[in-house]
Amino acid sequence: MADKQAQLDAIAEDIQKDGVTPELVASATQLVLGDGNPDADVVFIGEAPGKNEDLQGKPFVGASGKFLNEMLEMIGMQRSDVYITNIVKYRPPDNRDPKPEEKKAFLPYLQRQLEVIQPKVVVTLGRHSMNCFLPDLQISKVHGQPKRVTLSLKKNSTDTLEVVILPLFHPAAALYNPQQRQVLIDDFAAIPIILEKLDK
C-alpha cells in the first residue's frame, strides 16, 4: 500500500512539474490530488475542487463531502475504505465549471491514478465526470445504472483496466433538491451490490 501511495505522490509531483493548467494554478491555493485508500475497490470521481477543498487540499470536504460521508455510512463504508478524487485537480476560479481543455489536460493523470489503484468500481459524481468515461450518455437517463467498460490507460498501449462505471448525480446538486437527494441515496445503495457480484 505504501508503494501505491508513493506512486500517487509521484503523480502529484508530475502535475506540478508539467505545469498543467497554469491559469488554474495561478488562482488556486494548492493541488488537490485525492484522498483515501490507495488499495480501494471503489474510486469516486468528482469534477473539480471547490473553496473548502482548495483550502484543505482534500476533495469533498465541504457540504457535498459531508453528504458523501453520510451516504458511505449508509452502505457500511467510510472514507478510509474508498478513494476520492476529481478530474481537475485545481480549483477553477469562482467555482465555475471546468473547461473542456482543463479536463482534457488532467485526464492522463486521472488515468494514472486509476492504473495505480486498480479499482473494481468507478463512481462518477456529476455529468462532467461521467462524460470523461461515457461521453455519449445523459446523466438524467443513466444515473444509477452500472456500465462495464474497458478503459485504455495509455495512448497506443495495450494497458487496459476492466471496471464498472456507476454514474451518479453530484452530491452538490442533491443538497438543495430533496427529490434528487433521495434518488442519489437510492442509487448509492447499488455500490455494495455491484461489489458483491464482482467478487463472485
Image: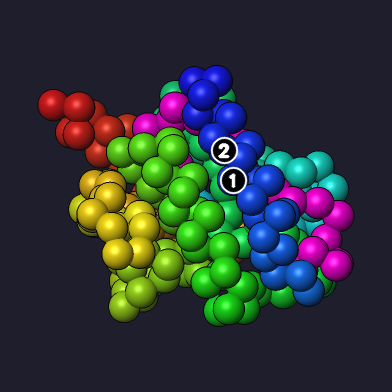
Question: From where the camera sits, is residue 46 visible?
Answer: no
Task: Residue 11: give its label.
Answer: 1
Q: Percent from the top left, x then y, of residue 135?
A: 35, 74
In the picture as drawn, the residue positioned furthest to the top comes out as 2
The residue lying at 66 percent from left, 41 percent from top is 66
Q: In the rendered structure, which amino acid carries the disc numbered 1?
A: Ile
Dot 2 surroundings within 10 Å: few (below 14), some, or many (20 or more)?
many
Q: Quadrant of the C terminus?
A: top left
Tag 2 residue: 8
Q: In the rendered structure, which amino acid carries the disc numbered 2?
A: Leu
Q: Percent from the top left, x then y, of residue 88?
A: 62, 61
Q: Would you say the residues marked 1 and 2 are in contact, meaning their CB atoms lie under 8 Å apart? A: yes
Q: Percent from the top left, x then y, of residue 199?
A: 20, 27
Q: Is residue 103 left or right of residue 187?
A: right
Q: Is residue 69 left or right of residue 74?
A: right
Asked if the stretch drawn in magenta spans residue 92, the answer is: no
Give the quadrant of residue 142: bottom left
Secondary structure of the residue carrying tag 1 is helix
For the record, the magenta segment spans 24-43
In the picture as drawn, the residue positioned furthest to the left comes out as 200
Secondary structure of the residue carrying tag 2 is helix
The residue lying at 44 percent from left, 27 percent from top is 39
